[in-house]
Amino acid sequence: MSQNQNKAGIALAICGLFFFAIGFALGINGFLTPVLKGALDITPVVANLLIAFNFVPFLLFGYPATVCISKIGYKATMAVSFALFAIAFGLFVPAAKFASLPFFLVACFISGAANAVLQACVNPYITILGPLESAAKRTSIMGICNKLAWPTTTVFMTLVIGKGLDEIQMSDLFLPFYIIIGIFVVLGIIALLAPLPEVKAAGEDEDDAAACPYAEGKTSIMQFPHLLLGCLALFFYVGVETISLATVADYATSLAKEGVALSASATILGYIPSIGMVIGYLCGILFIPKYLSQDKAMRICAWVALIGSVLVAVLPGEYSIYCIFLMALGCSLMWPALWPLAMADLGKFTKQGAALLTMAIAGGAVMPLVRAWVEGMTNFQTSYWVCVPCFLVILLYGSSWYKIRK
């Protein structure tokens, strides 16, 4: 292995740790939603504000994060994000102490800001760390780290607290959050000291503009339609992925209240979407780009997710919940394929493009609220119909929209 390959491998491993941290932080939403619904007697829409307040900051902090990267580099900006995470989890302690929903929302907002800054760093970093045609393979590796962290959050919290998910009280939350604060402080130190090389996309430097002829004559990021449509697809993707990952435990609880006999607890069922995502990521690692192009992977996954979302909405509850596996399996390679397809040929506009894509992650705030609203109007199972048009948009992008630049 060459020295450059060795450095890239080390950078990939460190970024994998950071992607795990992103998933762990987002997994707090899935854990807190049923806890707060039980402790504060709040409606599903209000409970889903936790998720919304985690994703709205992507709209506000996506561009400032890329400015920060330009000024101080990727490593230092990653360290800033972990400092923000530590502050956010510090605020969860008084939120639990006073059983205050506004406090929880503020803490979620700061955690979302930290997530926006970190995502603005790690996603373009992984995309341009190596050849663009194999970016989905690298991102699939990162995806495994990220998605395994979502259910790990609930397992970690229940193990530290020593109670089941349906038994947890506000006063039980102090210790795990103190531990999490320490973990994120350590991650910030690792980010500062890690041997992460600064990377740039082809044509990103002004004196290297000829390396990307498509972008050379452009004067605005708005002149890249494949990027703008990619942002739309990413907006819907993050929304439906969040629904797939964050609603299983709540759906299981809802079915149990209706008297539906389930074969496993809500905590165990919470692993269903993560298993689907990991299987999809493994396929991405094995088949992209040697046997499967990134755009074809997106099309296949969109069809799988479409079928899965329809089955979740129409099958009896005891079978329906397991079909979330198909939704998650379909979601798996959408993110890895979307980023390189949308960021292709941006040249000197690469960081601005990454900012727009990061801002599109705010879809994770909108679609769960739409689903919760439909749930309030109908029921939990019917609310999964909102995923169908989202997957159709993603299918269109993987079929034709990304080709506009060609």
Image: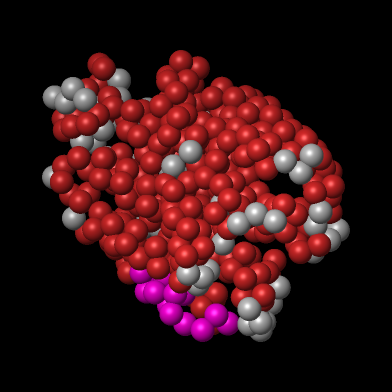
- Left/right placement of residue 21 relative to residue 286 reads right
Question: Looking at the image, which is closer to me, 12 or 38?
Answer: 38
Residue 238 visible:
yes
Q: Main secondary structure of the magenta part?
A: helix
The residue drawn where x is 30% and y is 20% is 205
Image location of residue 190, percent across then percent down: 66, 30
Q: Give the colour scheme shown.
A: secondary structure
Tell me: residue 13, above or below residue 155: above
Looking at the rendered structure, the number of numbered marks drawn on it comes to 0
Question: Looking at the image, which is closer to me, 5 or 331?
Answer: 331
Verify whether residue 367 appears in magenta: no
Image location of residue 178, percent across then percent down: 80, 38
- Left/right placement of residue 173 relative to residue 113 reads right
Verify whether residue 305 appears in magenta: yes
Q: Which residues are magenta?
A: 304-318
Residue 354 visible:
no
The residue drawn where x is 68% and y is 36% is 103
Tell me: residue 287, above or below residue 88: below
Image location of residue 351, percent across then percent down: 36, 28
Tell me: residue 242, above or below residue 98: below
Question: Looking at the image, which is closer to me, 224 or 175?
Answer: 175
- Left/right placement of residue 383 relative to residue 393 reads right
Quadrant for the C terminus, please. top left
Question: Looking at the image, which is closer to me, 201 or 121?
Answer: 121
Tell me: residue 307, above or below residue 234: below
The residue drawn where x is 28% and y is 27% is 349
The residue drawn where x is 26% and y is 40% is 228
Image location of residue 275, percent across then percent down: 56, 66
